[in-house]
Amino acid sequence: MPTVADDIAEMIAALAVEGERAPRAALKRLMLIGEAAFPALLTAAQQSPDLRIRRWALEGIAEFGDRRVRRILLSALTDEAMTIRLHAIHALVSRGDRRTGPQLIPLLTDVSGGIRVNAAQALGTLCIAIAGPALIKALRDQQWYVRQTAAWALGELRCTTARNALRRCLVDDRKAVRVEATLALRQMDARKSVQVMKST
């Protein structure tokens, strides 16, 4: 008769399946098992030779409060494998850890456009105020989707020092960038109006 350990091993192995549906289903089952699954997930996140298992295990350990998790996720942000860096970003965002700003900001200049855009998304989602200057620079990224997301993030941060840079984006070649820059400027204007009303 299968034991809990057998079930955990089976679910860890299922993380290697291509795509997202099967690995996410396996993670869900591991979360239902709870703390008993944590040691295996922790080991997989650090030591599995299979990148597919490692990346999903990183997201799995993010659900636990163990103090080792944050250190492992931060270390994964500098992993040579793009997929590991990507899933580490997702894991940190899922934890809502706003202390990770200094580690996320350098990823705005990562060699991978996918990492850069996810870093911008993370900084906006977590409202990392110190990311303002780096996000302003990201408005000049060669990839339009990075510029678009940087504009969105600056709007979320209500980064008023980005106004001039966002105005320059209003003539960007890509409509998506122009739209996001417009929305970001409107958010800043709305905040300014609220502040004026409160002061009168």
Image (cartoon, helix red, strand yellow):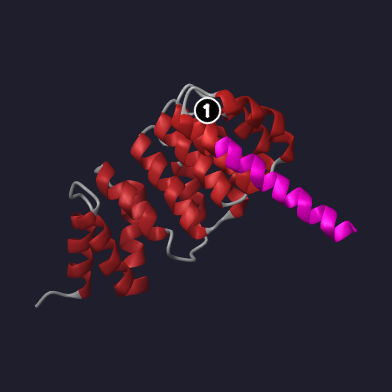
Could you tell me which quadrant the N terminus lies in? bottom left
Q: Does the segment drawn in magenta span residue 183? A: yes
Residue 145 vs 20, above or below: the answer is: above
In this view, the residue farthest toward the right is 200
Q: Which residue is nearer to you in this view: 154 or 187?
A: 187
- What is the magenta range? 180-200
Could you tell me which quadrant the C terminus lies in? bottom right
Q: Position of residue 199 (x, y in %)?
A: 89, 57
Q: Name which quarter of the figure residue 62 lies in.
A: bottom left
Residue 64 vs 13, above or below: the answer is: below
In this view, the residue farthest toward the bottom is 1
Residue 39 vs 122, above or below: the answer is: below
Residue at image x 62%, y 51%? 99
Residue type marked 1 = Thr
Q: Is residue 136 visible?
A: yes
Q: Circle 1 — which element?
A: helix
| Side of 135 where 112 appears, left or right | left
Q: Which residue is nearer to you in this view: 198 or 129?
A: 198
Q: Which residue is nearer to you in this view: 109 or 148?
A: 148
| Most common SS among magenta residues | helix
Q: How many tags in the picture?
A: 1
Q: Does the segment drawn in magenta span residue 91? A: no
Q: Position of residue 186 (x, y in %)?
A: 65, 44
Residue at image x 56%, y 56%? 97
Disc 1 designates what residue? Answer: 109
Q: Position of residue 191 (x, y in %)?
A: 73, 51
Q: Is residue 103 visible?
A: no
Q: Position of residue 157 (x, y in %)?
A: 65, 46
- The crowding category of the residue bearing disc 1, from other C-alpha atoms within 10 Å (few below 14, some 14 to 19, many at least 20), is some
